[in-house]
Image (tube, rainbow, N blue to C red):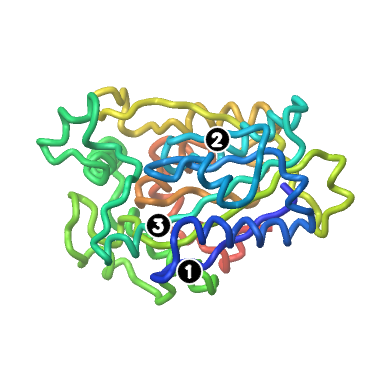
């Protein structure tokens, strides 16, 4: 990885998803110091109306390698893994991964746009009449973890509190004011046991990452970040097909990534965990091996997720 950047983020009312893709892409190329003409690979999420062929056209790219996937929050890790494989195989020299979304602005403006859906089509349609949409699925899984392992709602709330504390250090963050456990618990109930602050927010923004073959590293402005190992795993979409609500797909993908990288969880000083819902963070920490199964609540309640607490070397 030789370049990375964000577009305008948070509240961006006067922009299109294409604009945010372009902002992020230009900034990532500038960060790397590489010319756009070198980019021969492109990947984007491709959900809704923004297929990779359209975005690449908008960016003025004519890639000979392209990728797209719709696996939710792990989309970008999956596409980075595919890009690294393509470069290693000699199918591409420089791959740009890009994303742009006006999800928040679309809701505020009353616009209906094509988005990734995990709740209303195919086999999933049989769960929707019972209120089983995306948030409800994670809420039910969280409740199962609480029943089986004694995880408390206060421990789950700590994930939100510490994430907000970290956001206060980031000028790009949409919400930076501190919150308390009581703030989380007293919020409006969305899907038991989740209140509003247990759930992800809708925001606008984009990001881009540039991966390049080793021969280009010497021409880049910054030191590269080497990809040591990756793993991916598709477990389920329908709740009825989830064998154990307390185990996430990260239990498989994480094991594969660590094995391929030759790294053990205890050797990791810094980890970035997807946190759309508080339970996701907790169960992913367990499944990646940073703590034992059922120990996620105790792991997070002591401030282990705070950047400023000196938890990272």
* Location of mark 3 (residue): 159
Which residue appears farthest toward the left when viewing the image?
A: 129
Residue at 68 percent of width and 29 percent of height = 85
In the picture, the quarter occupied by the C terminus is bottom right
Residue at 23 percent of width and 62 percent of height = 110
* Location of mark 2 (residue): 78
Quote the CA–CA distance across marks 3 and 1: 16 Å
**Position in image of residue 129 (x %, y %):** 10, 36
Q: State the residue in front, 267 or 39.
A: 39
Whether the residues at callouts 3 and 2 have beta carbons within 8 Å, the answer is: no
- Helix, strand or loop at label 2? It is helix
Residue at 15 percent of width and 28 percent of height = 126
> Of discs 3 and 1, which sits in the foreground?
1
- Helix, strand or loop at label 3? It is helix
Residue 31 found in image quarter = bottom right
**Position in image of residue 107 (x %, y %):** 27, 61
**Position in image of residue 22 (x %, y %):** 58, 58
Q: Which of pointers 1 and 2 lies earlier in the amino acid sequence?
A: 2
Q: How crowded is mark 2: few (under 14 residues within 10 Å), some or many (20 or more)?
A: many
* Location of mark 1 (residue): 173
Residue at 40 percent of width and 33 percent of height = 248
């Amino acid at each position: 990885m030789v370049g990375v950047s964000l577009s305008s983020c948070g509240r961006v009312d006067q922009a299109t998803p294409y604009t945010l893709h372009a902002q992020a892409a230009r900034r990532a190329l500038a960060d790397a110091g590489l010319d756009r003409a070198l980019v021969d690979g492109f990947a984007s999420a491709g959900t809704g109306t923004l297929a990779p062929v359209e975005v690449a056209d908008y960016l003025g790219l004519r890639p000979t390698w392209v990728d797209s996937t719709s696996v939710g929050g792990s989309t970008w890790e999956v596409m980075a893994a595919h890009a690294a494989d393509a470069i290693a195989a000699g199918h591409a020299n420089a791959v740009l991964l890009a994303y742009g979304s006006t999800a928040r602005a679309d809701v505020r403006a009353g616009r209906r746009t094509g988005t990734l859906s995990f709740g209303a089509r195919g086999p999933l349609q049989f769960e929707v009449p019972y209120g089983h949409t995306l948030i409800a699925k994670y809420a039910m899984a969280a409740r199962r973890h609480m029943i089986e392992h004694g995880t408390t709602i206060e421990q789950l709330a700590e994930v939100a509190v510490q994430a907000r504390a970290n956001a206060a250090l980031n000028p790009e963050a949409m919400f930076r004011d501190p919150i308390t456990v009581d703030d989380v618990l007293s919020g409006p109930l969305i899907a038991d046991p989740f209140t509003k602050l247990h759930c992800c927010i809708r925001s606008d923004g984009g990001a881009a990452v540039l991966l390049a073959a080793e021969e280009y590293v010497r021409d880049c402005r910054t030191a590269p970040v080497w990809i040591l190992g990756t793993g991916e795993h598709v477990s389920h979409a329908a709740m009825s097909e989830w064998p154990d609500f307390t185990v996430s797909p990260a239990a498989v993908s994480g094991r594969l990534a660590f094995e391929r990288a030759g790294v053990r969880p205890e050797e990791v000083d810094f980890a970035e965990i997807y946190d759309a819902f508080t339970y996701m963070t907790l169960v992913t920490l367990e499944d990646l091996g940073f703590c034992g199964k059922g120990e996620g609540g105790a792991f997070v309640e002591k401030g282990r997720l705070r950047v400023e607490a000196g938890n990272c070397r």
